Structure formats: C-alpha cells, structure tokens
Amino acid sequence: MLRLIANIKVAVVALRTNLMRSLLTMLGIIIGVGAVIGAVSVGRGAQKMIEDRINALGANLLVVFPGGGFRGPVRGGTQGRPLLLADAEALATGIPEAMAVAPMVRGGVQAVAGNLNWATQLAGVTPSYRIARDLALAEGRFFTEEENKGAAKVAVLGARVARELFGESLVTGETIRLNKTPVTVIGVLGEKGQGGLGADQDDIVLVPIQTAVKRLLGGRHGRGDAVNIIYVKARNRALVAHVEDEIRRILRVRMRVRSGEDDPFRIVNTAQMQAFGDEATGIFSMLLAAIASISLLVGGIGIMNIMLVSVTERTREIGLRMALGARRRDILAQFLVEAVVLSVSGGAIGVVVGLTLARAIARFADWPASVDVMTIVVAVVFSALFGIFFGFYPAQKAARQSPIDALRYE
C-alpha cells in the first residue's frame, strides 16, 4: 500500500510537470465520459417522460378508435360503421374483467367566462371516464349518471382552462358559456400534463356525453349515438391481453365482420405503448453511448501515445532507478499508475462535464435528464480500465529496458 501511494505521488508530480500536455491528453477521456453521462442521463430522462405521459393516460387502459389500422401509406382494414354508444354498453356488460368502459365524443368549443374566453377541447363522457382515466379532482365533484341521462348543463374543467378563465380563484359554482350555452362548473381536474399522444390533458372541458350530443355539439357530431373513442380499463395488468381479445371479439360480432376481414376499428394498448417507448429510448441511449464511447477509445489511444513519449523522454531516469535497485515490476507499476492517474483524472473531470451537460439540456431544451449514480461509477471505472489497458504497453516497454542502455541514452 505504501509503495502504491508513493507511485501515485510520483505520477502526480510527473503529470504536473507537463500540465498542459496532460490536460490535452485527458481531453479525449473527458469528452468521452462527459458524453456518456450526458447521453445516458438524457436517455433516462426521455424514458421517464414517456412513462409519465403514458401513465397519465391511465393504467391498464385500452383505447378503441373507429377505422382500420394502417399498412404503409394507406389505411387498411374494413371501413365499417362508427363506434356507437351501444357498443360501449355491450363491452361494459360483456367483459366482467373490465373495471370501467367510457365512451367519448369530442369537438372544439369556445369557453367564455365574463369578458374572458378560451378555445379548448370539449369531451362528452360518462361518469366511468373518471375511473378509466384515473382522474383526480383539485376542486368540486364529477357529474353523476343521473346528470348524464338528463343532459344536465354541468361541466368539469381541466386545470389549464380553469386557470385561463378564472386565474387562481375558486371555480366551483361559477357559470361559463360553451358555444353560447350556459353551464355550471361543478369541478376542476388536477394537473395531468401531456398525454402519451402529445395532447395537453389539462386543456379540456368535460361534460356529460348526452349534454355534449344534445346541447353543445349538435350537427357537427353526426349521428347522435356515434362516439369518437371508447376507453376500457382492465381490472389489473394481467387481464389486459384478455380484455383486448374480448373487445375485438364483441365488436367484430356487433359490426358483422366476416372471418378473414380486418378489424374496422383500432385498439391501442397503453402497456404496449410503454414497451415500445422503453425500447425506442433504450436504443436511442445505446446509440448515443456507443458514439460517446468512441471518444473514450480515442482518449485511450492518446494516453498510450503520450505514455510512450514519456517513456522515451525519461529513459535515463529509468536506467538510474534500475541502477539504484528498482526492479522491472517497480518500473512497470510506476508507469502503469501514471496512466491510470491520467485516465481517472480525465474521468473525474468528465463526470463534472457530463453532469453540467445534462443540467444544461434539462434547463435550456426543456428535456428532462435523469442522472444515475451507477452511471457515474461505471464511467469512472471504465476510464480507469482504459488507463490500465492503454497504459500497459508503454509501462511494459519501460520495464523491459536494459539499465546500461537506458543510462547511455541521450
């Protein structure tokens, strides 16, 4: 241990003697480690952002859209009738493994409160929508099934809509106009942020589906029993695949789809979206880390190069040490420790650069960066291994020198 400490002290002195050259040699390691930490941090942040947006849609959720899937540049599948309220009712009664089935109709609406107005999205839903989407209320309550059946003129505002129309004041009990129709605000949703499909989930007004069809959307909605989306929430993650199969079976029967024909609807599984998102961000992170690793390789080659130069410059010193009793393994250890100190120092500076890079991206690009301690540890360990690997040959070359030839070297 004492010999190792002595070698480290000698290495530090040798590196400080040629400080600028040492810094330039470490540059490749600094850039490599910094880029790896920055890339992995940004990748993990992107993965967390995708997870948050998909989770904001609701856990164990299946989303049914009308129309077939896409094959290449054209839409495939049978173009049958739209989804209906009766389809949602059939799913609710026919799938006991479904915790909630919530149809939705939607359209643009102008919300007006006093002299303020805000263009937003109107969603006509049933009370089960709150369960399907895991909605929390910041204020007030959600509407009931009786209010839905009676097409009551009530509304629950998204957090952004409430903020745009009323600022930070309480909203429950206030009256707003939706397309000139007065409705009473009975609740405000908690903040949800962007969803997995990129939409702002706080920029929305929820009303009973019958209110939307009969009083607000009118002819723009088309036939009165058609819906745009049906949300189906499975009771747990293990039942998602079974619920998806049951949705497909029931809807194909109701839409009279013949065997061999494509589905005239699409089912989006949020669990699959999560898996695809994890896979995409994983590949993205690996690609960035692989590109950054090239800098580590270049830095390692730079260390080997400068250590070879150092061995040549200090040939007489090597001969003198051997003449005074230093063994070959002592010379090997001395130059190997120098290479490791050079590499680890570059790795430590690279960690600071990587953390700074990750914070800068998070701040200026509005992109989350998640720094993992294990990533930092692995990066520093790899920088030390690079020092050992690329420093071994120069150290071995120094140790193999003949003391007599080394003392004669000019």
Image (tube, grey):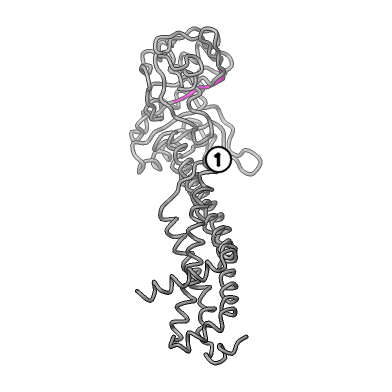
Q: Is residue 133 above or below residue 324?
A: above
Range of magenta residues: 103-109
Rendering coords of residue 221 (x, y %)? 56, 18
Residue drawn at the location 57% of the way across and 75% of the way down: 310
* Residue 277 on the magenta segment: no
Rendering coords of residue 163 (x, y %)? 48, 19
Where does label 1 land, which residue?
261
Residue 208 appears in the rendering: no
User: Tag 1: residue type?
Assistant: Glu
Q: Name the residue nearer the viewer: 324 or 334.
A: 324
Local packing at callout 1 (Cα closer than 10 Å; few below 14, some 14-19, many 20+) is few
Q: Name the residue nearer the viewer: 190 or 41.
A: 41
Q: Quadrant of residue 116?
A: top right
Which quadrant of the rendered structure holds the N terminus? bottom left
Q: Is residue 195 above or below residue 176?
A: below
Rendering coords of residue 271 (x, y %)? 43, 42
